[in-house]
Image: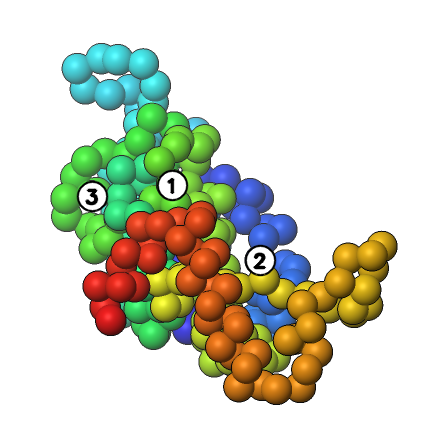
Amino acid sequence: MRIDIITAIPSLLVSPFNDSIVKRAQEKKLVEINIHNLRDFSTHKQKSIDDYAFGGGAGMVLSIEPIYNCIQYLQKKVSYDEIIFMTPDGDQLNQNSTNQLSLKKNILILCGHYKGIDQRVRDYLITKEITIGDYVLSGGELPAAVLCDAIIRLIPGVLNNETSALTDSFQDDLLAPPVYTRPSIFNGWEVPKILTSGDFKAIEKWREKKAIENTQNKRPLLGDQQKEKN
């Protein structure tokens, strides 16, 4: 998979892609991540990428020209399956959407900044708009990093145990069950005996039961979705 990211502040994306699972995925050549500085595509002497909004009002707006120039430059080299804009009013990111995006070959992500971007970018250049939650951040860089992490860990070969991602919360509209590790007794707190029994069929039933209970207690709406599917 290839992921290109257009940003006004590239330095915000350095750390998230240079550690842990995402770093190893790049080293294994399972994913290629390219970060593009929007200012490199500005035609202004000062490399400005924003301007005042027509009609007045507070805040600056990312200009259409450098964004268009950057996307046109990249599209000459790559055919993108999706051009995604990270925005608070986009579609809510969930496990189903990350599953679908993990199957794509080439993705381009545009990070918003300031008050927003020229609406014509959204109308004519963007194919998908995504938010990571109902709140506003200073820019789209952190949401882009979240999106990339959620996608990349699903790519076959990225995780050491490829079945691990399949048992994550939300994969089957259920939250994950509790997990424990050694020692089996600590400070008088004991691990459920079923987990040390060696009876793997019974363990799977226990985990399914706990996943359902966990979902009903914490996220009942997810539980309702799971019931509808059944």
Q: Which is more toward the observer, 40 or 220? A: 220
Q: Between residue 47 and residue 87, name the one nearer to us.
A: 87
Category of crowding for the residue at label 3, using alpha-carbon neighbours closer than 10 angstroms: few (below 14), some (14–19), many (at least 20): some
Q: Amino acid at mark 1?
A: Gly
Name the residue beneath numbered marker 3.
122
> Residue 71 lies in what quarter of the image?
bottom left
- Residue 8, position as x, y percentages in the image: 44, 39
Residue position for label 2: 17
Q: Residue at x 34, y 22 (%)?
A: 60
| Left or right: residue 9 compared with residue 105 | right
Indicate left or right for 222 with 175 as reference.
Answer: left
Q: According to the image, label 1 marks what residue? A: 133
Q: Position of residue 196 (x, y in %)?
A: 70, 78
Amino acid residing under circle 3? Arg
Tag nearer the camera, 2 or 1: 1
Establish if 139 lies above or below 180.
above
Tell me the element at label 1.
loop
